[in-house]
Image: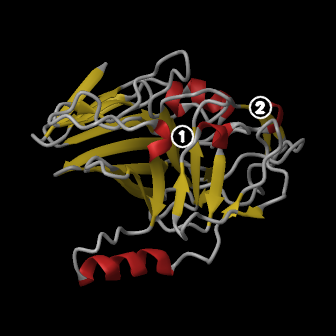
Amino acid sequence: MRYVIDNGQLRVEADSLGGELQSVKKDGGEYLWQADPAYWTGKAPNLFPYIARLTEGKYVLDGQTYSMSIHGFAHNMEMKAEEADGNRLVFRLDADEETRACYPFEFTYRIIYELDGTVLHITYQVENRGTKEMYFGVGGHPGFCLPLGQGAEPKEKENAFEDYYLEFGEEADGSGENAAAGSAQGMADAPDCPVRIGFTPSCFLNGEDVPYPLEDGNKIRLRHDLFDNDAIVLKGVPKCVTLRAQGSGRRVKVSYPDMTYLGIWHAVKKPAPYVCIEPWSSLPSRQDVVEDLAAQPGLIHLQGGGCYRNAWEIAFE
C-alpha cells in the first residue's frame, strides 16, 4: 500500500512493501529514480539485516547454516504503517516464522521518515526483543534520476549525466565566512585520501583495498564507465555528499553521520540515467568464505532488550 507525506515543500511517497520510497517531488519535479526496467527496477531499497551478498547466499550461526538473499529480506517484506500523517511516516516489521527461518532473532525493525522543510530525515531503528545478542547491518540504497527534478518548475536547461558530480563535505559557495568554515569542518574528519573497498568480479570482499583520490580534493565526476566493475564502495570520506551539476540550482545532499561506508552505483555497463548514493553500516562477505555472523567484522552487535538507531538525511535543494 502506498502512503504520502507532504509538508508543502516536499511530497514523499513510500510503499509498505519494504518501506521503500517511491517518489520524492519538489516544485512538481521528480528527484527519485522511477525504476525503468531497462536499467534497474528498484528505487530506494532499505537494507536489513545484511548488506550486499553472502558467499553462496549462506552464513553460519551457532553451528547452523542459514540462507539469505542479497541485501537481507526487509526490502521484500510487507511492513505495517504505524504512523502516517502530514510530516511523519513509520513502517514496522516484526520477526515472524518466515524471518526466523533465515534469521533466528526476535526483533522489531522500523523505518522512520520525517519531513523538515526540504529535508527528508530517515531513521533505522532496531529493537532486540530476545535475550541473545543480535548481529546485523543497516543501509540505504536510494537512486536519484538524472537530470534532477524532472518536470519541475521553473524549467532548467537539462544537464547530461556527465555534467553531474559528487562533492564531499559541507558546501562552501563563497557566500560568507560561515560557508567556508562549514566546508573545513566537513572535511576535517576525513583522511587525505579515501579508500576504495576491494571487491572481486562477483562482488565479494577480496581484501585489496586501495586509495581512491578525489578530483580537486573532494569530487567524483560522473561518467557511465565508472560502474563497469559494479559499485564503488568507499570508507574514509566525509559524512555528507552533494549530487549537483555546474550551473544548475537543483541538487541533493545526503548526510550519513553514523554510517561507515558509502556506495555509489548504477547498472553495470549501461548508460543508466541515475545514480545511487548508498550509506552502509557494514560490508558483504569475503570471497569464498561462508561467514560466521557472530564473528564477521563490522556488523552491529545488539544485546538482548537493546535498541539501535541510525539516522541519516537527504536534502533536496
Residue 140 visible at all: no
Outermost residue on the left side: it is 8
Q: Quadrant of residue 85?
A: top left
Q: Residue at x 54, y 46 (%)?
A: 222
Q: Position of residue 94 (x, y in %)?
A: 46, 35
| Viewer-proximal residue among 295 and 316 | 316
| Viewer-proximal residue among 136 and 269 | 269
The amino acid beneath tag 2 is Gly
Please give the residue where the numbered disc 2 appears in the rendered image. 57
Q: Residues within 10 Å of mark 2 (few under 14, many from 20)?
A: few
Outermost residue on the top side: it is 37
C-alpha gap between disc 1 and disc 2: 15 Å
| Viewer-proximal residue among 17 and 192 | 192
Q: Residue at x 37, y 52 (%)?
A: 246
Please give the residue where the numbered disc 1 appears in the rendered image. 47
Q: In the rendered structure, find residue 86 and report the number of the disc placed on it.
A: none
Q: Residues within 10 Å of mark 1 (few under 14, many from 20)?
A: many
Residue 287 visible at all: yes
Q: Mark 1 touching mark 2, by CB under 8 A? A: no
Residue 224 shown left or right of residue 6 in the figure: right
Q: Position of residue 135 (x, y in %)?
A: 64, 52
Q: Secondary structure at mark 2?
A: helix
| Viewer-proximal residue among 256 and 254 | 254
